[in-house]
Amino acid sequence: QVQLVESGGGLVQAGDSLRLSCADSGRTYNPYAMGWFRQAPGKEREFVASISSNGVSKYYRDSVKGRFTISRENAKNTVYLQMNNLKPEDTAVYYCAAGISASQAMRDMKTLLYWGQGTQVTVSS
């Protein structure tokens, strides 16, 4: 059973950095591609970044390229989202999810199999 738990959210100012973590506490080995998604109040959930199971392939939405970095540490069953130069428009609940393909995760959220509960990121101007 995959159990994803996000952490690392908080309230920061524009230009600050945060690192989100997503730990799979239900398994000793996570063979899935992983993704980060976010949902702002009144908006639909959107793709942020994804990474393949071996960490080689990474995908980002255009608005976070150059600012966010997704990585994974398979020995710890943990995926990270390093967020630099945060902007008020990055404010959202951030969710991690597990799926079969990192590229599919970018194209279609319905392909994700497991979701975490989310962590709030608030960026003040």
Image: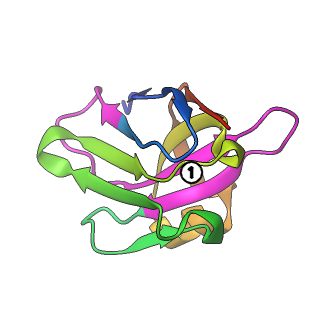
Q: Is residue 117 something one can see in this rendering?
A: yes
Where's residue 40, x and y in %? 75, 38
Q: Is residue 59 above or below residue 41?
A: below
Q: Is residue 53 magenta?
A: no
Q: Identify the image quadrant of residue 70.
A: bottom left
According to the picture, the residue beneath numbered tag 1 turns out to be 112
Where's residue 67, x and y in %? 47, 62
* Coloring basis for residues: rainbow
User: What residue is rendered at 22% in x and 41% in y?
Assistant: 77
* Number of other residues with Cα within 10 Å of mark 1, as a class: few under 14, some 14 to 19, many 20 or more: many
Which span of residues is magenta-colored? 22-50
Q: Identify the image quadrant of residue 13.
A: top right
Where's residue 45, x and y in %? 73, 45
* 77 on left or right of 85: left
Which quadrant of the figure contains the C terminus?
A: top right
Seen as rendered, the residue at the extreme right is 42
Label 1: state its secondary structure: strand
User: What residue is rendered at 36% in x and 75% in y?
Assistant: 57
Which quadrant of the figure contains the N terminus?
A: top left
Work out whether residue 87 or residue 42 is closer to the camera in this orientation and state it.
87
User: What residue is rendered at 38% in x and 50% in y?
Assistant: 82
User: What residue is rendered at 19% in x and 50% in y?
Assistant: 73
Where's residue 95, x and y in %? 55, 37
* 25 on left or right of 75: right
Work out whether residue 8 or residue 12 is closer to the camera in this orientation and state it.
12
Q: Is residue 107 above or below residue 28?
A: below
Work out whether residue 19 or residue 70 is closer to the camera in this orientation and state it.
19
* 115 on left or right of 22: right
Q: Is residue 80 above or below residue 122?
A: below
Q: Is residue 118 something one can see in this rendering?
A: no
Number of labelled discs? 1
* Amino acid type at mark 1: Leu
